[in-house]
Amino acid sequence: MTNKQQGNTVNQTRSDIRNIAIIAHVDHGKTTLVDGMLKQALVFRDAATAATAGERILDSNVLERERGITILAKNTAITWNNIKINIVDTPGHADFGGEVERVLTMVDGALLLIDAVEGPMPQTRFVLRKALALGLRIIVVINKVDRSHARASDVLNHTFDLFIELGASDEQADFPIIYAIGLEGHSGYSSDNIQPNLTALFETILKEVPPPTVELDAPAQLQVTTLEYDSYKGQIGVGRLRSGTLRKGMNIVRLTPQGERTEGKITYLFTYHNLAKQEVEEVAAGDILAFGGLDEIGISDTIADPVIETPLTAISIEEPTVRMTFGVNTSPFAGREGKTGWGTSRRLRQRLYEETRSNVALRVEDSSQPDRFIVSGRGELHLAILIETMRREGYEFDVSKPEVIFRHDPKTDQTLEPMEDVYIEVSDALVGTVVELLGARRAQMVNMDSQNGTTNMEYLVPTRGLLGFRSQFLRATKGLGQMHTLFHGYSPLVGTLPERQFGSLVAWETGVASAYAMTHSQTRGTFFIEPKAEVYEGMVIGEHIRAEDLPINVTKTKNLTAVHTKYYGEELRLNPARHMSLDDFIEFLGDDELLEVTPHSLRIRKRILNHENRQKERKRRADLIST
């Protein structure tokens, strides 16, 4: 540990600690590389225990494992050559950029993982921009160099160009490079000399990432960057101690960004060690810790010695671009599947506002209706994860179609809308199809190149044009196309966009769907339900082959008579139903529809269930427009 005198304070360097984050585009191997680091740092007792630990060890959330992406930032720590390395695994998807923006304030360096075949991708640009803005030391890790068609040299050149494009300083652009096979836990200083271990990576971290420089003798100050909850210990806050020392039982003050001041005491104090929290008596500045004891903790709160009067600067988070309305479930099937008492507006409001305490990129507002709330997020996926989490907790509610958040520019008196950079990878044979689809959505092509039978295209597209586009894109490319998006900024409105191409098949009556009725109606469209499914009037049961909605009776059964004809026993086959995921349902929603969400079911319904009332409302709106 070294000391530096600055004015009346002494800055000390904690040479026994390194704090790093792992950042990358989706599926470039962050969590898998952490697996290898944990195993080689002898976190597990023996090889057998390491083998049974499985893959993506830090992705403990069920939704993360199901979707194969990291949603929540995770903390862990390992020891290498008697130096503790705190590691933060971050999400790669831009919809969860709020997690990245928060946790990068805790570290001094970052491992930037880049796929040796794909090279820098949209989210690579996003996370790197955030890391460079904070002045972090970046170590570039070109991962998956064992893949066929790996082009490590080209990827390195593209990465350097990206650093320059994002305004990296000379020191940041002179980044160290490691080549790795994260899945096998191998690394090296060149792509031709990969060693069967991660020693090269660990040595580079210790050499290149600066140790934290702190004021150990100053009053304690910590900014909360992550929240956890323990059923026994209550609310747990996580952050990096900026200065001083925190001790178990110590009196502290909580300062909110709004200036509120609450006194309390540290009841529990933990540091991270391997895969677990380790309870300790005190923590010195420079380390990442978790603490408990306060009844209420929020992101960006400052936890400090009582002598501190002002909070640390609040963490800056980009504003949401998409919103949906969450409301109490009012369908005829309400109350059947959710937890008793959890379907009320009071309970729904409480749950949504609680989410904003840890999910800082989310915004919740009360609407003009007491049982409906406006929830804004960074994208459709951001909101879909919240919906899926709540339904698994036992809530039932309904949500509206996503819509973009417009802004008004007072200087030009123009309405501005969010725009997205869209990166698409398809086979050469499908280029025309994709160009036609995006052209109808007011997309502007920025770049296009083709290599080895694959075409890469870059577009600038209004966010409005991307709502509901992903499923259409996957169908058009037969599931083989790849699409990535990144928020670009706000621009003037580009004009009108095409509406949904097909209408809905709507149940005419309440009852049980029969195979007989569905078989004779299947020429009208594609069903979302199976025979014997319960339906109610106004429930959307399929997609019509035409642009308008079509009410049909799927509860009708065959009349049984004693008259036998040569057609008695005719064989009619019912086409299989289209099985829709939550993401598919959200993308299918129309302006006059709601998605009913329960722990066991997803159903689309019309806002106005009765057909005649819907017709009256439609006529009323048409009259208003005409006048």
Image: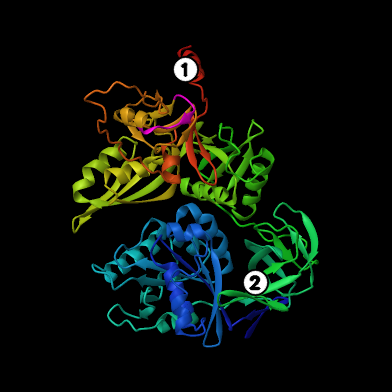
- Which image quadrant is residue 254 in? bottom right
Evaluate whether residue 166 shows in this view: no
Mark nearer the N terminus (2 vs 1): 2
Q: Quadrant of residue 162?
A: bottom left
Closest to the camera, between mark 2 and mark 1, is 1
Pointer 1: residues within 10 angstroms few (<14), some, or many (20+)? few
* Residue 276 coordinates in the image, percent (x, y): 59, 74
Give the residues drawn in magenta, as a range: 508-515
- Look at the picture and state if 122 lies above or below 182: above
**What percent of the width, then of the height, locates residue 598?**
54, 43
Residue 358 appearing in the image: yes
Query: Could you tell whether 412 is left or right of 313 in the image?
Result: left
Q: Nearer the viewer, residue 489 or 377?
A: 377
The amino acid type, in three-letter code, at marker 1 is: Gln
Query: In the rendered image, which residue does mark 2 sit on?
Result: 289
| Picture layout, residue 51 above or below residue 454 | below
* Residue pictured at 25% horizontal, 30% vertical: 570
Classify mark 2: residues with Cα within 10 Å, few (<14), some (14-19) or many (20+).
many
Residue designated by label 1: 615
503 sits left or right of 301 in the view: left
| Residue 365 belongs to magenta span | no
